[in-house]
Image (cartoon, rainbow, N blue to C red):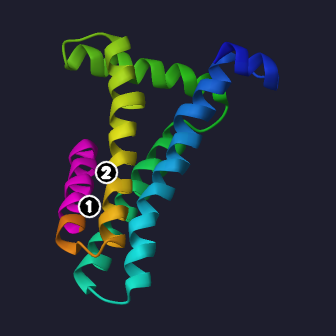
Amino acid sequence: MSTLGNLLGLSYQEVCVIGNIYVQGALLVAAAALPLWYAFKQEKHYLLKTVACVNVLCCTALVLYFCFRYAPPLAASFDRCVEDLKTLAIAWHTTYVVINIVIFVLWWLCSIALNLLATIYVYEGKYRVSIAILLLHASFIIFLCI
């Protein structure tokens, strides 16, 4: 992140906020939109379209929450995010580093993977599997928000 910041003329903190909040958030919403797009291309299966839409709405709401919570100035956003991660680390009886990896690496990769997997199943016409995956993903986001 420091090297990327130097190349772009930004600080480490600014690159972290832009990359981990805004870029990852945009990619999450884009990945969530794929199953919905394929569901509408199929022109069938009302339940799949509804569940895919709920999934997109959940992802969008989560990303918007993060974008507003960690709105510029970016240095202050970075500090706020670090404090939030430290608070979560204390609540979950672990370290800041573990929480950071769980949220910004593991959870994010799993979310992208679930949405892409659902997209593949929609494309293959396996609607029930797609619905189950999308419900699981949307439920997990709702659980995180509670």
Label the magenta part by its dominant secondary structure: helix
Depicted 97 relative to depicted 38: above or below: above
- Badge 2 marks a residue whose secondary structure is helix
Cα gap from disc 2 to disc 1, whole angstroms: 7 Å
Image position of 137 (left or right of 61): left
Q: What residue do we see at 32% from left, 26% from top?
A: 102
Residue in the image at 26% along x and 53% along y: 137
| Mark 2 touches mark 1? (CB < 8 Å) | yes
Q: Secondary structure at mark 1?
A: helix
Magenta residues, as a range? 131-146
Residue 46 placed where, x, y %? Answer: 27, 86
Q: Quadrant of residue 96?
A: top left
The relative height of residue 120 versus residue 25 in the rendered view (above or below) is below
Q: Position of residue 23 (x, y in %)?
A: 58, 41
Residue with the mark numbered 2:
114
At label 1, the amino acid type is Leu
